[in-house]
Amino acid sequence: MAQPDESRTKPKVVDIHTHMYPPEYISILSSRTEIPLVRTFPSPSSPDPDPRLILLEAELPALEKALQDPSAPIPGRPLTKHFTSLPQKMHFMSTHGIDISVLSLANPWLDFLPASEAGAIAERINASFEEMCSSSSSKEQKLYFFATLPLTSPTETILSCIAHLSSSGSLPHCRGVILGTSGLGSGLDDPALLPIFHALAAHNLPVFLHPHYGLPSAVYGPRAGEEYGHVLPLALGFPMETTIALVRMYLAGVFDAVPGLRMILAHSGGTLPFLAGRIESCVLHDERLVKEGKTAARRRSVWEVLRSQVYLDAVVYSEVGLKAAVDASGGGREGAERLMFGTDHPFFPPVGEEGDRDGEWESVRLNVEAVKRALGEQSEEAELVMGGNAMRVLRLFD
Ligand code: 5CU
């Protein structure tokens, strides 16, 4: 039997999907009266309850009820130190054997800020992420970050933010940007976004595309808020939102217009790995698109775009989903080279009385298991997904 090669250095584990809310962001949320917001509700079981973080439109009915009736269930999720504390992030990394984390501000980023404030706040938030990365990186653990763009500001402000991210040398740990699906307010197929996508490509800044808005609450039905918790918006709304955003970009020809653009899709591309064939078929059978010559032989298919300009994170919690993501990305070694491990920390913590947030998280274990089962424990492909791909694509060199 082949002996393990002791001289081989341990492959790095990189978490590319891991969020933080720096203190200035929490102050903004705490000063707000509309979603997104942070608010503390009295609790019968604790004299000093955690504030609650209320983010999603689907949480609005529960918030309104709790504001009127102190005995109603408390809305949102607890704002624990996992969302805000850097030592807690480092502890989480050690607990789960993570060597490098690529941090990002969590949703809804700066989407709700007035145009006049967003530019300066983005600058402060990005500086804060840089400070976290430079102050906490050590020989054993390293941090990088995806920056936040002031998307409600005028285009010149956004472009100058992008130029600052890569050229000034003041943000050496920045490795791309995190983007929601709203763009400048009309989605990511908005032609007004093209200069921004060109600038990101020119500065070699990949886009980490992440959902927030889900689907209109009406599709979840009248029982959702009271009876189904966050399951429908998070399990289905988020992935559909990502899928729709990417397909709109594809149909608008953004990938052809900006061939240097690189996208990393959260949650393994939502439902894209499963639906790419159907999307492709709908394009080819659409009378209007055929008539307008948009299905010409030289057109790049959805599959080709997935295999050239798109990467997927591996936050999918199952071997079945991970295999589909690898297959949609080209299959075998080629497909495995396009997937990157993530945890979604601090979301999906252990819950309930028994839930120990300082110990091992089941949500992380499921994502690690999925990689091992889909690609083989200690296989080269699994090592690429767990860290090698992120090191290569995001230039995370020692
Ligand atoms: O639990 C949630 O609401 C979330 C969220 O808002 N963002 C995220 O990335 N994961 C879970």
Image (spheres, rainbow, N blue to C red):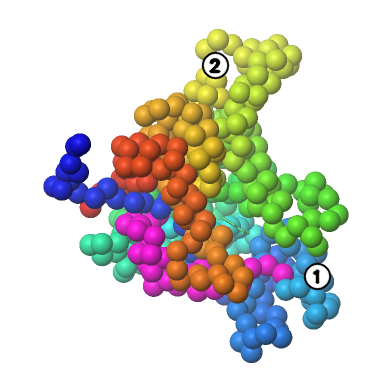
The stretch of residues the image draws in magenta is: 75-102
9 up-or-down from 37: above or below: above
Q: Quadrant of the N terminus?
A: top left
Q: Secondary structure under badge 1?
A: helix
Residue placed at 48% from the left, 62% from the top? 361
Image position, residue 39 (x, y; %): 67, 76
Which of the 4 image quadrants contains residue 225? bottom right
Q: Which residue is mark 2?
A: 299
Residue placed at 71% from the left, 51% from the top? 232
Which sits earlier in the primary sequence, circle 1 or circle 2? 1
Image position, residue 255 (x, y; %): 51, 29
Q: Is residue 302 visible?
A: yes
Is residue 109 rendered magenta in the image?
no
Q: Which residue is mark 1?
A: 64
146 up-or-down from 273: above or below: below
Residue placed at 72% from the left, 60% from the top? 229
Query: Which residue is at the far front?
Result: 1
Image position, residue 384 (x, y; %): 34, 40
Q: CA distance from mark 1 to mark 2?
A: 49 Å
Q: Amino acid at mark 2?
A: Arg
Q: Amino acid at mark 1?
A: Glu
Residues 22 and 141: in front is 141
